[in-house]
Amino acid sequence: MVKRQGFPELNELVMCTVKRITPYAAWCNLDEYGVEGMIHISESAAKWVHDIRDFVKQDKQYVAKVVRIEADKNLVNLSLKRLSKRDEKEKINSFKRAQQAEKMLEQAGKQIDKSVDESYEEIGYLLQDKFGELFTAFEEARKDPTALEKAGVPKKWSDLLLPIIEKAIKEKEIVIKADLELKSYEGDGVQRVRQAVAEIEKAGLKVSYISAPKYMAEMTSKDPKEDEKKTVAFLETVAAKAKQAKIEFSYKIVK
């Protein structure tokens, strides 16, 4: 079960599971926080509600928005009507990420005989505080293996987690695209353009013919920000060489 400390923030989206229903409210467990939540009948749907059971089912999990916190009663007031479908989708995706991250944490903890609760106490809550989400922390560690220790995680934990993270989180590849135009009015212009295209392909870009004089250059990248800079620098070099070869050349990075 995904865990977070304390109480949620006002207006935060949370996952809750309905445990009992009374005529005017549904009483829930906040699945991440371990505190009780209450959905009043007036917050169960945007329209007038005669019977809350028409909109809320026992033992079903919902995304809800926090509308009031009564810390002295260990109670959080929730709403189902004050969130959009987009909010709901984003929260569900976030919760799935948290579940995936928890499994990684649990896997590492088992190697040193730590329960999930103990793993959270030792490093889980720390990483949530530092990165907002456990999964975000692991994503950063995937990019920078020193990120966990920089955040205060003991080396023994970092050494256990890094191989698990590397296996579980695949680096995303982004396609960088550039529209190209190449033309030459020389007698052997077609050959000159072909040679220029071949030089671009030698640099690792895949060039596709669209229609004269248009081409599309593509490359996959795990570091799109840096590789886009390198691509622009390379195409500037191509432009200079094309001018010398009496080829009209232009490019535009496709966003």
Image: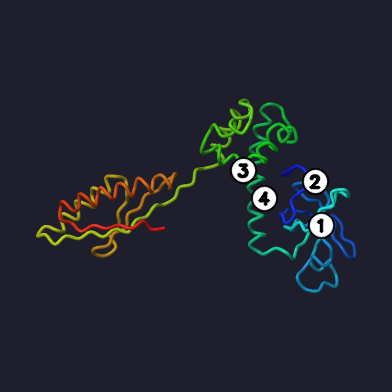
- Left or right for 5, reference 152: right
The disc, 2 or 4, on the residue closer to the chain's N-terminal end is 2
Given this view, does label 1 or label 4 mark the residue nearer the observer? 1
Circle number at residue 95:
4
Circle number at residue 135:
3
For badge 2, the amino acid type reads: Gly
- Left or right for 152, reference 53: left
Say which of 40 and 50 sits in front. Answer: 40
Toward which corner of the image does residue 41 lie, by quadrant? bottom right
For badge 4, the amino acid type reads: Phe
Given this view, does label 3 or label 1 mark the residue nearer the observer? 1
The quarter in which the C terminus is drawn is bottom left
Q: Residue placed at 34% from the left, 56% from the top? A: 178
The disc, 3 or 1, on the residue closer to the chain's N-terminal end is 1
Gap in angstroms between the C-alphas marked 3 and 4: 10 Å
Query: What residue is pinned by disc 2?
Result: 34
Toward which corner of the image does residue 88 lie, by quadrant? bottom right
| Helix, strand or loop status at disc 1 | strand
For badge 1, the amino acid type reads: Asn
Percent position (x, y) of residue 247? 18, 56
Gap in angstroms between the C-alphas marked 3 and 2: 20 Å
| Helix, strand or loop status at disc 3 | helix
